[in-house]
Amino acid sequence: MPDTAERALHTRIARSVDAIRRSFVDNLFYVTGRTLEKATNLDLYTALAFTVRDRMLARMVAAEEIYHRRGAKTVAYLSAEFLLGPHLANNMLNLRVTDNVRDAMKGLNLDLDAILEAEQDPGLGNGGLGRLAACYMDSLATLEISATGYGIRYEYGIFEQTIKDGWQVEVADAWLRNGIPWELPRQHRYPVKFGGHVERYRDDERRERVRWIPESTIYGTAYDTPIMGYGVLNVNKLRLWKSEARESFDLQAFNVGDYYGAVNDMVTAQNISKVLHPNDEPEAGKTLRLRQQYFFVSCSLQDMIRLTLRDNGGVEHFAERFVVQLNDTHPAISIAEFMRLLIDEHLMDWDAAWALTRRSFAYTNHTLLPEALETWPVDLFQRTLPRHLEIIYEINTRFLDDARVRFLDEPARLARLSLIDEGPGNGERRVRMANLACVGSMAINGVASLHTELLKHTVLKDFHDMWPEKFRNKTNGVTPRRFIALANPPLARLFDETVGDAWLRDLGQLRALETRAADSAFQERWRAIKRVAKARLSDRIRRTCGVTLDPDTLFDVQVKRVHEYKRQHLNVLHIVSLYHRLRQSPTLDVTPRTFVFGGKAAPGYRMAKLIIKLINSVADVIERDSHVNKVLRVVFVPDFNVKTGQDIYPAADLSEQISTAGKEASGTGNMKFTMNGALTIGTLDGANVEIRAAVGEENFFLFGKTVEQVEATWASGYRPREVYERDPDLRDAIDLINSGLFSHGDRGLFRPLTDNLLDVDPFLVCADFRDYVDCQSRVDVAYRDP
Ligand code: F58
């Protein structure tokens, strides 16, 4: 590089306080067109984001170059969701410039925290699955592993949750409105076909080939977001696809006068990446979801094949250049798309293509709930992806031929293994995406030890019988960079001072804290740090909800998506029961508690929305009871997301992980609480099992039925109403809810919830109630001994 260019670059690389300050003022003027005097917090944020980004780009370019020279293999992490959380503070941390930036801002009389606050949470995911993808991206970058995340650049992410009269109200998340300083629009653009039909022809060598004549073709354009490793020079990227029509509109159609037709095509193309689908939505809108999945998978594979051809000379070298991880079944159509690209477009023969496919893909399963395993109606597939359906049939025929050799006289098993669910009688036939992923992958993993075991013995048992060697566990993890260092700086400081700073890359180093457990000065500091986090959260809640909390009470927290299997209503029943007991005996000696809830319900999930309403109604009534509210407080924090989570996890004394055993695949919030020093009250479910083993049984409030006991309960003809009749506390709690006390006298409002508990209780809330309440009493006692 010529000297002057290098010097010019240098002004955007230097990390001294002075250089950062000058760059910032420069960016403020030349990017936002504002001076310091006129700048809003959003302007200041934008200028600072560019200042930090400038310092990342040289590393990104260098990392690409190094990987290229080394011929490194790249992990392609295919995921329909990436829930990254705010970038600015994270990138400052990873670049290790936080202190200098803070000083630079101070020098300009600016408050860094207020600037950070202006960044919106980029919500391109629903919950755990999307956040896991983001944690993997952070970790891969820090471990200096070449990795690219591939996904969709949704125009609207997960809705923003507001609470009106206790009910959840969804607001559209127009996250692109103010521009995103982190993303780099790229020229890479790929066609993606839909619909139409398939033709056969003979090539020059008289071999039969297939041509897909689509009904429509749209295009995907790449937007890259750099993902920095912590304290290393490595930068990976997240490559998200935006859908577009070929041109902004079809000029030819315009010329023949069909202006609206042309505009319509444009709108149809743009719709594909328009909005993230909330989970647990009913069947409607599913066509668009299948199109979204195929869209991002096709763009991503075409991109990887381009890079393989560029770097390795031939598509047959794909597995030396990439390994593709499928984050659940949403990208499982990859298996068929990769086969199509190899066979139809790169003219490979079937056997070679199939062998390459099975060396290139691996599949992560995130659920045991049978209703959550994705299937698509064959009709819909035929209409949307006719060539892929053919390929899936062919894969299936060959696969079942193999399976038949092993399971000759087991038609029921073969029917379960089939990629096609034939449906009951003349019911609808469906394509089973998990089966496709299993057959096409070299490895299959669950996300916690218990979950992987259950997978092997329940939903994927037939595949496990066939290929036990493909199954392996990969217990989820979360990044300590974001969830300790960023979320809880005082705790990070204590860790640094006690065990050194290597824990940021190797969390096992925190074991060394154990030697200080009995040291009273250490204990004192630990408690002070928790107190600060609780005061900080209380402050935020006062500003956003107008409620003033007492940081000296026990903070009992449940934040996660609202779902019946996660049993927020079990938590509420405990609160109502406590409330009832306190009203009966005003002098009852309970440990003062603040119950904090947060979490979104899928917009179409009525029961989950009713649970939110119940939490808020109970909170209201208790708030107005001047006697009880001295010892009991309940607050629902609206719009739980990565950003609000960072304030909530550090403040918890007690972490609620109370799903019905066997239902939560892993959980990751459980880990975020634990690493911030909260104790867990929980069932033996998901990664709770491993957390309990790691922290020690004596530091875990265990309750509830085990997976085996859950099965036995169902097998013995469970009748929740009998539990209700027998347990006076449960009866009082449910009766109080039905009395109308929490619904302005409306006795019917919560009946769908309570009737469901008494008639069916699909998640054994009543069955686990007694054990949970008793366990909570042990929590009360423990908290009194600091
Ligand atoms: C979650 N799944 C699991 N799915 O529930 C949780 O136990 C696990 O810790 C986490 O994955 C990471 O492995 C999850 O979040 C979704 O949000 C899907 C999004 C697409 C629609 C169906 C639900």
Image: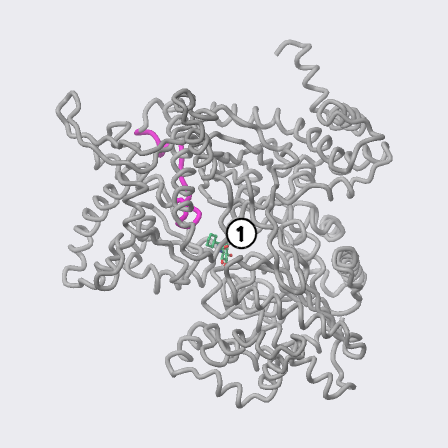
Residue 495 visible, this orientation: yes
Instruction: Identify which residue is drawn at 61% across, 76% down.
Output: 573
Q: Is residue 725 above or below residue 372?
A: below
Whether label 1 lies within 8 Å of ligand 1 gets the answer yes
In the drawing, does residue 783 fall left or right of residue 168? right
Residue 749 position by quadrant: bottom right
Would you place residue 352 above or below residue 515 in this image?
Answer: above
Residue underneath mark 1: 126
What colouring does the structure picture have?
A: one colour
Based on the picture, tell me whether residue 324 belongs to the magenta stretch.
yes
x then y, percent, for residue 469: 32, 53
Q: Amino acid at mark 1?
A: Asn
Callout 1: helix, strand or loop?
loop
Percent position (x, y) of residue 683? 53, 70
Left or right: 375 with respect to 557? left
Looking at this view, is 725 or 368 the one in front? 725
Front residue of this view, candidates 238 and 135: 238
